[in-house]
């Protein structure tokens, strides 16, 4: 009987551990991977408070470093989170922070910003479903377009926009800047 009770408790402990691991996996499916938007808010905006409150404040290297590998979908999930709203930061100003992160200038290729893929290859991947909304700010942004941006790091997105190949498409960068914002507003706003 004692052996049966020990076996019962062992099975219960294993089930609790398994359920706990499953629960962690469920949380990991969010826009920020295994981290909550609240935790990412702390990570991302720790060095970005001034430029998030004042559009004329310079974006520091520390702020840029905290954003470089953050996927665009995660950044905008943070901006639309309840915790962000409680900070009293204007979303319109927060939208402008990623733009200087890559530090790219017109026509300059950014080696490594998109990991193992070239900016040309990423341009094809990202803008395949985003051509209309990239040319017309009033065109709706499709779920396919937004899904193509989900895992693209901010630095990669801006490297694409400032690449020579992008310039050849004849798309206005100012409109291209708005695509992640429009995706966030359409698909993440509660």
Image (cartoon, helix red, strand yellow):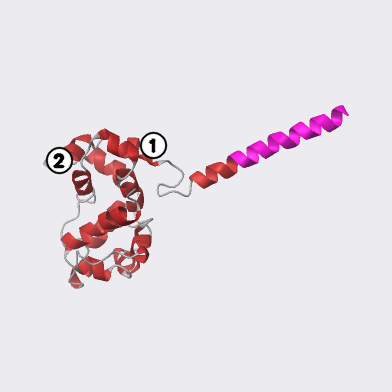
Task: Give 42 or 169, whichever is nearer the viewer.
Answer: 42
Which quarter of the rendered picture does the N terminus lie within? top right
Look at the magenta stretch and give its main secondary structure.
Answer: helix
Provide residue 68's location: percent of width, then percent of height. 30, 47
Picture quadrant where residue 146 is located: bottom left
**Residue at the disc numbered 1:** 39
Taking the image as shown, residue 124 lies to the left or right of residue 107, namely: right
- Is 75 left or right of 51, judged from the image as shown? right
Q: Farthest residue toward the left?
A: 56
Q: Image check: 30 left or right of 78? A: right
- The crowd level at tag 1 (other Cα within 10 Å; few <14, some 14-19, many 20+) is few
Would you name the residue on which mark 2 appears?
A: 58
Residue 2 in percent (x, y) is at 86, 27
- Above or below residue 17? Residue 130 is below
Question: x%, y% of residue 41?
Answer: 33, 38
181 part of magenta stretch? no
Residue at the image position 14 percent from the left and 42 percent from the top: 55
Residues at marks 1 and 2, CA–CA distance in whole angstroms:
24 Å
Relative depth, front residue between 5 and 140 = 140
Q: Secondary structure at mark 1?
A: helix
**Which range of residues does the magenta coloring cover?**
1-20
Specify the label residue 19 is tagged with: none
Residue at position x 48%, y 46% in the image: 28
Instruction: Name the residue located 19 percent from the left edge and 68 percent from the top edge.
Output: 136
Say few, some or many: other residues with alpha carbon within 10 Å of mark 2 (under 14 / 14 to 19 / 20 or more).
some
């Amino acid at each position: 009987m004692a052996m049966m009770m020990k076996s019962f408790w062992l099975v219960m402990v294993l089930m609790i551990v398994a359920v706990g691991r499953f629960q962690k996996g469920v949380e990991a499916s969010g826009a920020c991977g295994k981290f909550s938007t609240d935790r990412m808010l702390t990570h991302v905006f720790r060095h970005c408070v001034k430029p998030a409150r004042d559009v004329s404040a310079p974006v520091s290297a520390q702020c840029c470093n905290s954003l470089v590998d953050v996927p665009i979908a995660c950044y905008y999930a943070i901006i639309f989170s309840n915790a962000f709203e409680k900070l009293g930061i204007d979303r319109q100003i927060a939208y402008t922070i990623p733009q200087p992160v890559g530090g790219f200038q017109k026509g300059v290729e950014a080696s490594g910003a998109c990991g193992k893929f070239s900016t040309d290859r990423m341009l094809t991947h990202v803008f395949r479903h985003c051509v209309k909304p990239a040319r017309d700010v009033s065109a709706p942004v499709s779920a396919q377009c937004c899904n193509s941006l989900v895992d693209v790091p901010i630095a990669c997105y801006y490297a694409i926009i400032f690449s020579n190949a992008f310039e050849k498409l004849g798309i206005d960068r100012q409109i291209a800047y708005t695509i992640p914002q429009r995706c966030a507003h359409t698909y993440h706003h509660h």
